Image (tube, helix red, strand yellow):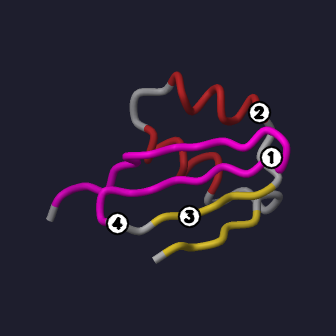
Amino acid sequence: MTELQVILMKYDFWSRSLKLIYSDGSGAIYTSVPEFIHQNMQRCENKMAFVQKYLEYDLQFQKISLL
């Protein structure tokens, strides 16, 4: 089994939402994401580790799963 990776990332400045598409075809939309989080994620090498560390376990971001 291959490791899950972020293959597409799109940030909407006006709604402060971050849309992520993963290598298995699934995706997620995180809401109320500050722009600096998106900018930091763009700079990091392992985007999946960033998602797990800063988005998945932070209660201020709401996650909407896309299948």
Kindly identify the amino acid type of the residue bearing the numbered disc 2.
Answer: Glu
Measure the C-alpha gap from mark 2 to mark 1.
7 Å
Write the residue at 62% across / 27% down. 40
Write the residue at 64% across / 52% down. 55
21 or 1: which is nearer to us?
Answer: 21
**Mark 2 neighbour class, 10 Å CA radius: few under 14, some 14 to 19, many 20 or more:** some
- Tell which circle, 1 or 3, labels the residue nearer the N-terminal end: 1
Stretch of the chain drawn in magenta: 2-24
Tell me, yes or no, whether the highlighted magenta stretch contains residue 28. Answer: no
Measure the C-alpha gap from mark 1 to mark 4.
23 Å
Looking at the image, do the residues carrying marks 4 and 3 touch, with CB atoms under 8 Å apart?
no
Q: Which mark is residue 16?
A: 1
Measure the C-alpha gap from mark 2 to mark 4.
25 Å
Kindly identify the amino acid type of the residue bearing the numbered disc 4.
Answer: Gly
Horizontal side, residue 6 vs residue 62: left or right = left
Q: Which mark is residue 35?
A: 2
Kindly identify the amino acid type of the residue bearing the numbered disc 1.
Answer: Arg
Q: Which mark is residue 28?
A: 3
Residue at the extreme top of the image, as rendered: 43
In the picture of the structure, the residue carrying the numbered disc 4 is: 25
Looking at the image, do the residues carrying marks 1 and 4 touch, with CB atoms under 8 Å apart?
no
Write the residue at 54% across / 28% down. 42
Write the residue at 40% across / 28% down. 45
Question: Relative to 10, does residue 63 appear above or below in the rendering?
Answer: below
Mark 4: secondary structure: loop
Measure the C-alpha gap from mark 3 to mark 2.
17 Å
Looking at the image, do the residues carrying marks 2 and 1 touch, with CB atoms under 8 Å apart?
yes
Horizontal side, residue 5 vs residue 15: left or right = left
Q: Position of residue 31 (x, y in %)?
A: 76, 57
